[in-house]
Image (cartoon, helix red, strand yellow):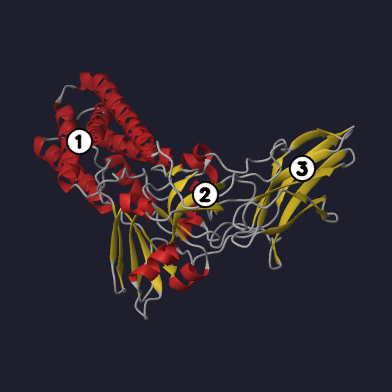
Amino acid sequence: MGTWQHGAAAALFGVGTAEILAALWQTGSPVDAAGKLVVDSGPRPVVERTVKYLRAADKPAIRALVAGTAVGAGAVLGRADRSLPRDLAVTAAGAAGSALALRRRGASDAAGGPQPARALGTAAAGGLAMLLALSMPPRGAPALALVGGGALTAAFRARKRQLSRHDTARGAGELKVVRPLPPARDGAESWPGVSPLMTPPHDFYVTDVAMRPPLVHPDTWRLDITGACASPLRLSYAQVLARDLVEFDAVLSCVHNRLGWGRLGNQRWTGLPLRDLIDEVVPHAAAGFLVTRATDGWECTLPLDLVRTLDAYVVVGMAGHPLSAAHGFPARVFVPGIYGQFTGAKWLTELRLTEHPNQDYWLPRGWPREPVPVRPTARIDTPAAGRLPSSTPVVWAGVAWAPPYGVEAVEVRVDGGPWQTAELAAELAPAAWRRWRLPLFPPPGPHTIQARCAGRGGVLQSAVPREPFPTGASGYHTVAVTTTA
């Protein structure tokens, strides 16, 4: 019988070998593939709690869980009675499982296509490396762990460098639009503490079910518009950019955004009106839905009536530059006024017209079939909870959004008292957020400050506290402060 330390070290060595080869070959990561299986098969309550408590750290945590599970399995194997046939069977089973996971997620690479041979090769190499490590004397366990851990770290760093090089190369130039919008200004540039009018791209929230963004090469990428239409269309990236691109300002919000969170952002986007592309292919009379498909196989369905009614876009840029990989390069679908989970695919590769709705990714997880509209919401940016002087008025400020029709008013109240109307900055666009502020002078003592948004058309922010599932969070953002004399 061996030792658990030897088995754990051998497993780490195998995982590190597979990951470094996958990074060098620029193919699918076995750890990410296993993590994707965890994401796809995890019970919804577990997923919801993961999002709530880990926020942006969810994917690193899942990677750590996968690697830790592999090391734990190796530790168990190291303690068991072993023989060469048994070791071969165990490592082959692990390699086969990794290869199947890679195939299941598509194993897409920068060239934009499944690579089953490379996926199988990395998984087999990892299994072989673990087998060889198990055959070594147990005293070599520290060296195996060091090499395996170093390879795993190097692989993750190589992935980050590949992503950085991809974004640097793709985002170097500015996109040309037919009629550029005027500079984004709302008169609140001097308001201290409030969110920027335009969320910087590097601060803009990123959320999706992919463990890592696919690196799509623009020379090989194609956008296919197919299905129930008379004139299917295929466009290259260069052909998309050569069309009449337009700019629009809009807020994009995640359905998991909770009161006071920053899982949303406001930006100037560049793209093509989706209804123009749909009209160009001449949909059949029976076509009622548009399936948006990503390069990794993820799909989301939009009712065709919604696409025609709202301003929907195939987006290729933000802040005047091409999208980054994390934000969906080379293209994504965006319907202002719909939560990001339902608005369409990132890393778009196909728009498919159908007569019936698709079995989308979210449906088996209990989310609604119909796209969910963004709830009108106000957020307090400043001041934060804590102690404040009562000798001078405190200016409360924040942002409010009610896409696609716009914010009509923001109101603030102290300790559940009467609502007071805040000053609104100028409206950039109905689908964009608006900044607001209001000076308050509460007496010394503890207080709760709440804000609410009124959208155009008489839509008022709901006072009923609700969790994000299944139609977005509601209630009032509340900040507790204590004013001192």
Measured along the vertical axis of the image, is residue 20 above or below residue 138? Answer: below
| Mark toward the viewer: 2 or 3 | 2
Q: Nearer the viewer, residue 282 or 203?
A: 282
Q: Measuring 39% from the left and 64% from the top, which residue is drawn there?
A: 277
Residue annotated with mark 3: 396
x 85%, y 54%: residue: 417
How packed is label 3: few (under 14 Cα within 10 Å), some, or many (20 or more)?
many
Residue at horizontal 81%, vertical 54%? 421
Residue sitting at x 35%, y 73%: 282
Q: Nearer the viewer, mark 1 or mark 3?
A: 3
Give residue 180's mark: 2
Position of the C terminus by quadrant:
top right
Residue on which the image places disc 1 = 126
Q: Position of residue 27 (x, y in %)?
A: 24, 41
Three-letter amino acid code of the residue under disc 2: Pro
Left or right of 21 on screen, residue 383: right
Q: Residues within 10 Å of mark 2 (few under 14, many from 20)?
A: few
What secondary structure is found at the residue carrying circle 2? loop
